[in-house]
Image (spheres, coloured by chain):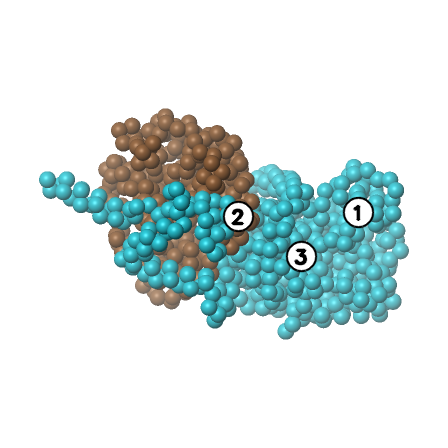
Chain colours: A cyan, B brown
């Protein structure tokens, strides 16, 4: 199976991308400010929810159960959605999904599409596919619109334009909307966006959405958002097409009770999303009269097949792990070379896409555990990162690589107390070329990354174990004498 | 009580003062200490970097060496986390019922130093004397895996002469992360620089923690920038008394 992901396939390694981004003072300030604000709001509303830990455990259990019976629930969804007048399409990879969607738009004679925020469409590179076929997609979620108009890339899974501040948004709007006057006041910026979008909402006949949840029992689809632009996209057009990863399914309408409490608090620090849109099939005389759902695999069943990594599919894309991640907070999302950034990106991207650069992602973490702590569906991200590191090491073991040789040598040293002691003696002798005036300030090779900004003490004259022997002897002599 | 010490490979090699302090402290409190010389490493570095296969025999050695211990004391929260969070799964993977059982029975007897003192031995005031301005850095594993919370601070508050100052953004990672500091040196440096700023803002002379790994990282930066701030493992502060100041103290 080929999984194609457009531009991300050529992304540089995390280290390379991060090196550049760390120099961008404006970006770091924007990212720091935004993540601080969202994390702060989240902390307050999570604290007030007495049964938060139970909710997390329940959500995790629902997800585990659903994934264990994914085939049944998907078929159930298909039957219910079809019965309600919808059409269900199955896409095994990005190319197939793009083909199905482009064909549908052509079939309805559309030249333009209004979109409400769908990361999955970015995953498959849908906008490119649209443009290649003469179809113009309009992003209507404010942040996605800022990214689209700025010819930019999303940097956060919930707030794609998080790396931009008001002043930058003002510039983009003035340039792209041809405005001669605009302040950077939120009210003014929103008004400009509203003017720009209203016209599209009324004119464009085809709407396109993602899905936060697919409900297996009713065949319904649920999208949550803050602006109401999504509500317009799923109600005003004649035709609605929804793209959803197969992991978005939950067994029943009732399960929303759990997720609609967890998601907004985790994502934006709100008690409830301002707009929760739910629809099932089509209704005569009301809303879109044609409804299609494209169910996308694109590597998801492969993740499902790995018991250690399966929990990756629990993700409800709340972004809490990004906001709390000390690595993401330094670099922002672009360093991850994929629309899925931060800790969840570091585990999703290498599993979904066989990309060169994605091999660097499982190492883009200090394993501090902050992501696991905030994750509303209890994905043990550090555990999955370690698992993926193991996979990378196993795949790379064929070639002689300095790290593997070093790690194996260390493992031998640790295979007995005596060997460790011998290595300690050797180390004390071997370190002298690097010690100057009692300190180690330069180390060769990869270790030079340490001494680039940090000093190091040389090995002390005596190891603990050698001190211990003397200590024991003294004690014994003390007792004997 | 008979306490077996697992001093960890890097404390043994790089920070012998920590081990000596643990011995001095626990002996002062009237306990009998043993240090099995066969011990080496818990396997954390290998395991976390993706060399899980190489970590396996290290796990087996650890269990073999300590399986009959009354309690095991480890002055490093990340090593305790390695043992608690990963050993059961690793043992499971071997399919060896004897090993699975041994891990299961050993785990409740493994304590990080402050856990041992406060939770097991029920002591907060260890009669220490340390007349310095000190700030405490909560390492990630101590916070999110061991959930030590206030334990180390409770011990520190009882130290005579200490001027304890709170560290801002205490729950932020210092950027060490084992091989992360090497593999992602630049991001690690960016994280470190924020940590250093917080440490310096406390105007402390000493930054302490329950992990020498973080302290080595933080100190590496503090020393490079010639801040004059020292890092000292919690054990050294607790071992220090008026009659017998910590080794470092004696030198200065
Ligand atoms: S991994 Fe968890 S915290 Fe991160 S986006 Fe997904 S659900 Fe949210």
> Residue A72, position in %: x, y?
62, 68
Which residue is located at x 60 percent, y 59 percent?
A13
Which residue is located at x 43 percent, y 31 percent?
B205
- What is the CA distance from the residue labelled 1 to the residue labelled 3? 21 Å
Please state if A209 lies on the left or on the right of B151 as rendered: right
Is residue A354 visible to us here? yes
Give the secondary structure at mark 1: helix
Pointers 1 and 3 in contact (CB under 8 A)? no
The residue positioned farthest toward the bottom in the image shown: A1
Is residue A370 visible to us here? no
Please check whether the numbered discs 1 and 3 fall on a single chain: yes
- Residue tagged 3: A339
Which residue is located at x 51 percent, y 55 percent?
B183
Q: Disc 2 beta carbon < 8 A from ligand 1?
A: no
Q: Residue B146 carries which label?
A: none
> Residue B68, position in %: x, y?
26, 54
Please check whether the numbered discs 2 and 1 fall on a single chain: no
- Residue tagged 2: B188
- The picture quadrant where one finds residue A130 is bottom right
First in residue order: circle 1 vs circle 3: 1
Up-down relation of residue B202 to residue B235 (above or below): above
Up-down relation of residue A462 to residue B157 (above or below): below
Sort mark 3 into few (<14), some (14-19) or many (20+) by Cα contacts within 10 Å.
many
């Amino acid at each position: 199976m080929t999984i194609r992901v457009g531009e991300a396939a050529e992304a540089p390694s995390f280290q390379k991308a991060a090196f550049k981004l760390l120099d961008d003072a404006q970006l770091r300030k924007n990212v720091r400010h935004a993540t601080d604000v969202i994390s702060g709001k989240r902390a307050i509303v999570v604290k007030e929810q007495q049964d938060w830990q139970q909710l997390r455990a329940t959500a995790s259990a629902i997800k585990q159960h659903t994934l264990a019976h994914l085939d049944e629930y998907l078929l159930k969804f298909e039957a219910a959605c079809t019965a309600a007048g919808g059409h269900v399409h199955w896409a095994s990879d990005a190319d197939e999904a793009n083909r199905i969607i482009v064909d549908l738009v052509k079939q309805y004679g559309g030249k333009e599409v209004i979109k409400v925020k769908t990361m999955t469409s970015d995953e498959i590179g849908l906008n490119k596919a649209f443009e290649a076929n003469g179809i113009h997609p309009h992003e209507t979620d404010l942040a996605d619109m800022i990214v689209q108009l700025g010819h930019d890339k999303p940097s956060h899974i919930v707030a794609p334009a998080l790396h931009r501040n008001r002043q930058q948004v003002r510039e983009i709007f003035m340039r792209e909307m041809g405005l001669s006057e605009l302040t950077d006041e939120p009210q003014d910026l929103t008004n400009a966006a509203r003017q720009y979008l209203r016209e599209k909402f009324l004119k464009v006949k085809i709407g396109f959405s993602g899905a936060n949840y697919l409900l297996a029992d009713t065949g319904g689809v649920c999208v949550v958002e803050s602006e109401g632009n999504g509500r317009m996209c799923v109600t005003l057009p004649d035709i609605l097409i929804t793209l959803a990863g197969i992991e978005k399914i939950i067994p029943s309408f009732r399960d929303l009770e759990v997720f609609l409490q967890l998601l907004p608090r985790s994502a934006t620090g709100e008690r409830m999303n301002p707009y929760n849109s739910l629809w099932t099939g089509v209704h005569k005389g009301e809303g879109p009269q044609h409804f299609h759902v494209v169910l996308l695999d694109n590597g998801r069943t492969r993740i499902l097949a790995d018991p250690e990594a399966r929990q990756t599919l629990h993700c409800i894309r709340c972004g809490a792990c990004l906001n709390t991640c000390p690595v993401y907070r330094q670099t922002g999302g672009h360093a991850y070379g994929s629309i899925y950034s931060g800790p969840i990106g570091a585990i999703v991207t290498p599993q979904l896409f066989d990309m060169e650069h994605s091999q660097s992602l499982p190492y883009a973490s200090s394993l501090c555990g902050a992501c696991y702590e905030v994750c509303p569906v209890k994905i043990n991200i550090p555990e999955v990162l370690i698992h993926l590191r193991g996979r990378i090491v196993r795949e790379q073991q064929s070639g002689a690589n300095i790290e593997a040789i070093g790690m194996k040598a260390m493992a031998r040293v640790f295979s007995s107390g005596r060997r460790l002691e011998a290595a300690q003696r050797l180390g004390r002798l071997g370190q002298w070329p690097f010690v100057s005036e009692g300190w180690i300030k330069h180390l060769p090779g990869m270790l030079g990354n340490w001494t680039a900004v940090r000093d190091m003490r040389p090995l002390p004259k005596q190891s603990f174990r050698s001190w211990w022997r003397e200590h024991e002897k003294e004690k014994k002599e003390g007792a004997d004498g | 009580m008979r306490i077996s010490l697992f001093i960890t490979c890097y404390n043994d090699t790089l920070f012998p003062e920590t081990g000596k302090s643990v011995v001095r402290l626990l002996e002062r409190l009237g306990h009998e200490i043993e240090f099995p010389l066969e011990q080496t490493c818990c396997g954390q570095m290998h395991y976390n970097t993706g060399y899980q296969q190489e970590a396996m025999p290290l796990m087996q050695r650890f269990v073999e060496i300590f399986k009959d211990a009354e309690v095991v004391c480890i002055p490093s929260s990340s090593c305790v986390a390695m043992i608690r969070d990963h050993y059961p799964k690793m043992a499971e993977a071997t399919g060896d019922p004897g090993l699975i059982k041994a891990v299961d029975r050993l785990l409740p007897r493994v304590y990080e130093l402050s856990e041992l003192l406060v939770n097991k031995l029920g002591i907060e005031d260890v009669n220490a004397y340390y007349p310095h301005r000190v700030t405490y850095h909560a390492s990630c594993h101590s916070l999110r895996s061991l959930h030590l919370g206030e334990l180390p601070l409770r011990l520190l508050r009882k130290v005579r002469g200490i001027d304890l100052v709170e560290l801002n953004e205490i729950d932020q990672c210092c950027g060490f992360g084992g091989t992360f500091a090497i593999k992602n040196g630049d991001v690690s440096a960016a994280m470190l620089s924020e940590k250093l700023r917080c440490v310096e803002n406390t105007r402390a002379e000493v930054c302490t923690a329950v992990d020498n790994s973080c302290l080595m990282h933080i100190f590496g930066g503090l020393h490079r920038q010639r801040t004059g701030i020292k890092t000292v493992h919690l054990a050294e502060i607790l071992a220090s008394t008026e009659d017998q100041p910590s080794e470092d103290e004696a030198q200065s």
